[in-house]
Amino acid sequence: MGILSGAVWANEAWGSYWNWDPKETWAFITWTIFAIYLHIRTNPNLEGVNSAIVASLGFLIIWICYLGVNLLGIGLHSYGTFTLTSN
């Protein structure tokens, strides 16, 4: 419900449901990895090492989405950047 209501809100605020913003794209990648992980966990033939690899990849992608994309300062969601000041 959150993703769907966010898309409706984005359409009202920015005029489109999806803008290929880096934050939106990496959030989509994160949700896709999470869906793959849940699929692997529910399939008995793929449990074990496969789910651990996908969980580790998901952890890495969440850090990229949380830190890397926030600090880039590109796109519609560029409110979390660091500004470097020189003295």
Image (cartoon, rainbow, N blue to C red):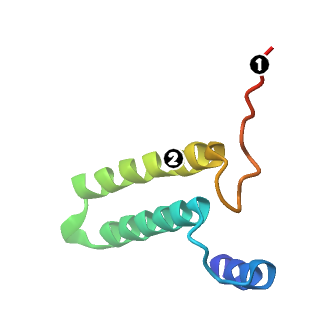
Q: Nearer the viewer, residue 47 or 9?
A: 9
Residue 1 picture location, percent across and down? 66, 82
In the image as oriented, which residue stretches furthest toward the front? 87
Residue 44 picture location, percent across and down? 23, 70
Q: Residue at x 78, y 24 (%)?
A: 85
Three-letter amino acid code at the position of disc 1: Ser
In the image as oriented, which residue stretches furthest toward the left? 45
Residue 40 picture location, percent across and down? 31, 68
Of tags 1 and 2, which is closer to the observer? 1
User: Relative to residue 48, is residue 74 drawn left or right?
Assistant: right
Give the residue at mark 2.
64
Whether residue 81 is visible to the viewer of this picture, yes or no, is yes
Q: Nearer the viewer, residue 2 or 45?
A: 2
Q: Which is more N-terminal, label 2 or label 1? A: 2
Mark sitting on residue 86: 1
Q: Looking at the rendering, in which quadrant would you find the C terminus?
A: top right
Whether residue 48 is visible to the viewer of this picture, yes or no, is no
Query: Local crowd at mark 1 within 10 Å, few (<14), some, or many (≥20)?
Result: few
Q: Residue at x 30, y 57 (%)?
A: 51
Three-letter amino acid code at the position of disc 2: Ile
Circle 2: element type: helix
